[in-house]
Image (tube, rainbow, N blue to C red):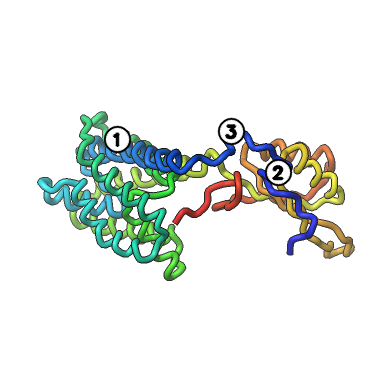
Amino acid sequence: MMDARTEPAEGTAEHTPTREDRPKSRHESILWNLALIAAGSLLCAWAINGVLVPHRFLSGGVTGLALIIHHLFPFLSIGLLYLVINIPIYVLGWLYIGRRFFWYSLAGLAIFSGAILVIHPANPIEERLLAALLAGIVYGAGGGIILRSLGSAGGTDILSIILLQRYSIRIGSTVLFFNAGILILSTFLFDLESVIYTLIFMFVSSRLVDLVVTGFSQRKAVLIISAHWEAISEMIVKKMNRSVTLVPAEGGYRHEQGKILYTVVTISDLPQLKNYIRQIDPNPFVVVTNTLEVIGQRIGNQPHW
């Protein structure tokens, strides 16, 4: 239950917006998101054609399925295969996901497929382990950049969102299921060594995606229990320019009345917050937890589908 004395959120009278805080115009937003999709697609295409194809590695999702077909029938283009496999997925997407996300993802599909058709770099590394690591870094960075836009490059991203909205199946579970299916199928079609290197590639790329999407802007949820809650609350609002929610609470042992403070800060602000708290109360009770996603003005990523 939220106390009536909740402080104003960031971006209100307690915060003076800067140029960076002001929203982009519609055209600036469109260009920015298309630029993110294009940059990410170029990196992914470089990893696919420069490393995955020469070393006969695979990938997860629709890209992995396109790679399997290409390895079996080399005359078929990966870019065209990716485009064709995505058609039925986009038909479902038109019915079940938001229009903004759909149109950005449609543009992403065209850009991603085109990048695979155009980008054909020379194989930079012969050593397969180093190649798997390099591909994971580049592909993961590209995928993360795409996901920082308001769209996607298609594939399991759209299918995952549809299953989440229709059947409450978690996005991670859908991705894991499809990736596991690709790997199981590949064990019957390719040598075990290639499958193991593919696992290394997929692990590294997934970590890079997390790092690019949330790693540099990770938010931490902080619960603070202290007898000096009023001073700490004032400090959070005035010194750190962060909002804070006051939750009525009662101690289970002495039944003392008080407030639990709840706030969300960036990972870079966390050490400063803990230092301020200790200056006010040397013995507070503080719980810091990771956040999966934070929705709010100037706070974090919002669902865009």
Residue kind at label 2, given as amino acid type:
Arg
Residue at 60% over, 47% down: 297
Task: Tell me the tag on residue 131.
Answer: 1
**Distance in Å between CA atoms under marks 3 and 2:** 19 Å
Residue kind at label 1, given as amino acid type:
Ala
**Residue 155's image quarter?**
bottom left
Query: Which residue is the site of mark 2?
Result: 242
Residue kind at label 3, given as amino acid type:
Arg
Position of residue 274 in the picture relative to residue 171 (left or right): right
**Distance in Å between CA atoms under marks 1 and 3:** 42 Å
Q: Nearer the viewer, mark 3 or mark 2?
A: 3
Q: Nearer the viewer, mark 1 or mark 2?
A: 2
Mark 1–mark 2 contact, CB under 8 Å?
A: no
SS type, badge 1: helix
Between 166 and 94, the one lying in front of the other is 94
Percent across and percent down for residue 205 are 38, 43
Task: Tell me the tag on residue 19.
Answer: 3
Position of residue 11 in the picture relative to residue 152 (left or right): right
Between 217 and 225, the one lying in front of the other is 217
Percent across and percent down for residue 98 are 42, 59
Q: Earlier in the sequence, mark 1 or mark 2?
A: 1
**Distance in Å between CA atoms under marks 1 and 2:** 44 Å
Residue at 54% over, 41% down: 23
Percent across and percent down for residue 226 are 82, 50
SS type, badge 3: loop
